[in-house]
Image (cartoon, rainbow, N blue to C red):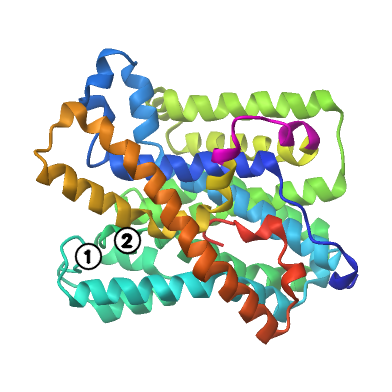
Amino acid sequence: MDATTNPPAQRNAGIDLLRGLSILLVVLHHIGLRIPLRKTVLLDVLPKSLLTAVNFNGYEAVFIFFVISGFLITRNALHRSGSLASIDLRAFYARRFSRIAPCLLLLVAVLSVLHLASLPDYVIHREGQSLPRAIVAALGFHLNWYEGMTGYLPGNWDVLWSLSIEEVFYLGFPIVCLLTRRTWVLVPVLIVLALSLPWTRGALADNEIWQEKAYLPGMAAIATGVLGALMVQRWHSVPRGIAAMLSVAGAFGLYLVMFEGRWLWQAMHDGSMLVLTGAALCLVLASAWSRSHLASWRGLGWLRSWGRLSYEIYLTHMFVVYSVVRLFKAMGGNVSLGFLWYLPALPMCWLLGKGLEHFASTPAERWLRRRLQVGTQASLAPAEQGVQAT
């Protein structure tokens, strides 16, 4: 089916909410590592488990992003091509390049200048690391491997580990689709990959950084999202009761991971990551099959806007985090009132992401798509514009 015959895919309010929650958790995590909420006076009025859940689920949130990303990219490919066996390789790669390259190149350029200017928090100083090698790793989609071998990079570089996993997956995904040609061949491969998460992650326990950032565990989560998109293609709608059950199951799964993580880890070890990706899949499917209901949710427009800007916020939020933490320390570093510094930090992260999207990301993406002849402005599907790290 020719892509030009299809209208642009519409945004999904439920998925934007889930994506907004995920990017918010990432930001709160990176602030919380430096100004923990459980060390503030909030501990006198709120449960420690709640404050811990708010601050320390950023890594889990990235795996939710992986599931969402796999779902959306596959849904958009199916929308344009009709089937994965008919993917237009050139158009697929051109769209990914148009989406990823402008912000990535801009970020790497800014970080390189800040490193050369010897600005604190931005200097690459670990033994075995260097600016040229970090640039190659970031642009060559193996920054996760580079960190696993040499140690953590400064925070603004470190966020690119998830991008490395996603883009390597999408480099190979359309080729695999064209080689298999049949869904009944592709689906078992995706199922095996999705279910491999506990074992691929557990096998890397001797290297903590690589265990967190290795390719296969992240790809397992992305494969889970791909399977979700194929399910929605196969069953365009389900009874409302099933969608409601999926919502409840997904919410309960996320609660277990985020609030009962220690107990869940003791019971299942790396298997708890399957609970996480399974819960994310349930919520994504519920959103896909309950669009009209979720679109009517009121009072959460701000969170959906975080979801729409998730890629831009993800790439830039550490600039705000470092600035706020520096100011916090310069003004005495009173940890008991540290929660007050979250109040300016969160809107500043959104504003920086919005500025990047408005002045650089979207204009550059549209220009590149015209140059690469993969569609006009009208073909910039709303569902694709806000894919975090994709």
Q: Is residue 314 visible?
A: no
Q: Is residue 360 visible?
A: yes
**Mark 2 Cα shell of 10 Å, populated few (<14), some (14-19), many (≥20):** many
Residue under label 1, please give it.
Answer: 122
Residue at x 58%, y 51% (from the top left corner): 308
- Residue 47 vs 390, above or below: the answer is above
Give the mark nearest the N terminus, 2 or 1.
1
Query: In the displayed structure, does residue 25 sit left or right of residue 21?
Result: left
Q: Which residues are magenta?
A: 292-303
- Residue 2 vs 313, above or below: the answer is below
Q: Is residue 294 magenta?
A: yes
Residue under label 2, please give it.
Answer: 156
Residue at x 27%, y 31% (from the top left corner): 339
Residue 76 image position (x, y, % from top left): 74, 60
Q: Front-most of 348 and 28?
A: 348
Residue 39 image position (x, y, % from top left): 20, 26
Q: What is the three-letter code of the residue carrying label 1?
A: Tyr
Query: In the displayed structure, does residue 244 sit left or right of residue 354?
Result: right
Where on the picture, by quarter, is residue 295?
top right
